[in-house]
Image: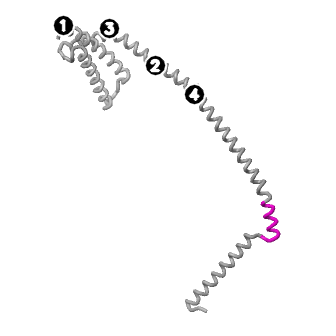
């Protein structure tokens, strides 16, 4: 490895150290400090450091074809220390401002969608429901009136028929009763004949 490549590798490692510090603060800000142990937190920590290691080796691969030297780890620690001493407070302020800005922007967009899209849709659905109820009520009243108009002459004709010839349903029921009584009598005769009674 030439001196220029070594120098670039050290600069890249210092940059990776600064990146480690910033990304770790970002990770802590979103994960928080849990009061008790959780397996999900352990998995998240392992994944976080695996991603950081992959980023470090990817940077080395771009700078010096992936050669790892001990002084590069010292350069990473140097970059991390530089971040902690010089950039931590500034970055945390920028991070909080970005989170606050993102939340505010999200709230504004959500409220705008609610006012401009969701509320009009709700109002339109209420209007459609009201119109549907009015339409159904009107159709039902029309059907009821037509039914009354049609049923009136039918009832009048039926009453005239009953007055003239009697109730056909009543005569049918009487005939059915007579048939049932005859069947009962015949069954009794058969039962008496086989039982020896006269």
Which residue is under mark 2? 102
Residue that appears at 34% across and 21% down: 27
Earlier sequence position, callout 1 versus callout 4 = 1
Q: Nearer the viewer, mark 3 or mark 1?
A: 1
Disc 3 marks which residue?
86
N-term mark: 2 or 4: 2
Image height check: is 75 above or below 140? above
> What's the CA distance linking mark 2 and mark 3?
26 Å
The residue tagged with tag 3: helix, strand or loop? helix
Quadrant where the image shows the C terminus: bottom right
- Judged left or right of residue 168, residue 55 is left
Q: Nearer the viewer, residue 6 or 92?
A: 6
Q: Secondary structure at mark 4?
A: helix
**Which residue position holds label 4?**
117
Dot 2 crowding, Cα within 10 Å, few <14, some 14–19, many 20+: few
Of the two numbered discs 1 and 4 in the rendering, the one whose residue sits closer to the viewer: 1
Determine the residue positioned at 36% across, 11% down: 89
Which callout, 1 or 2, points to the residue nearer the camera? 1
Segment colored magenta: 154-166
Label 4 close to label 3 by CB (< 8 Å): no
Q: Check residue 159 for magenta coloring.
A: yes
Q: Secondary structure at mark 1?
A: helix
Residue toward you, 3 or 44: 3
**In the displayed structure, does residue 123 sit left or right of residue 9?**
right
First reached walking from the N terminus: tag 1 or tag 2: 1
Our reading of the magenta stretch's main secondary structure is helix
The residue to which callout 1 is attached is: 3
Relative to 29, residue 42 above or below: below
Left/right of residue 7 with respect to residue 140 in the rendered view: left
Q: CA distance from mark 4 to mark 3?
A: 47 Å
């Amino acid at each position: 490895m030439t001196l220029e490549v070594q120098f670039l590798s050290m600069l890249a490692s210092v940059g990776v150290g600064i990146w480690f510090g910033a990304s770790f603060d970002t990770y802590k800000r979103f994960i928080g400090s849990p009061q008790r142990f959780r397996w999900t937190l352990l998995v998240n920590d392992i994944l976080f450091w695996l991603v950081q290691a992959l980023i470090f080796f990817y940077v080395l691969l771009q700078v010096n074809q992936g050669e790892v030297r001990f002084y590069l780890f010292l350069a990473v620690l140097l970059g991390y220390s530089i971040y902690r001493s010089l950039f931590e407070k500034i970055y945390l302020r920028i991070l909080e401002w970005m989170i606050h800005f993102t939340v505010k922007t999200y709230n504004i967009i959500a409220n705008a969608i609610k006012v401009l899209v969701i509320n009009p849709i709700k109002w339109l659905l209420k209007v459609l429901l009201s119109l549907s109820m009015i339409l159904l009520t009107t159709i039902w009243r029309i059907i009821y009136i037509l039914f009354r108009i049609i049923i009136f002459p039918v009832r009048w004709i039926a009453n005239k028929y009953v007055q003239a010839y009697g109730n056909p349903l009543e005569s049918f029921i009487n005939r059915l009763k007579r048939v049932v009584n005859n069947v009962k009598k015949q069954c009794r005769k058969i039962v008496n004949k086989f039982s020896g009674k006269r």
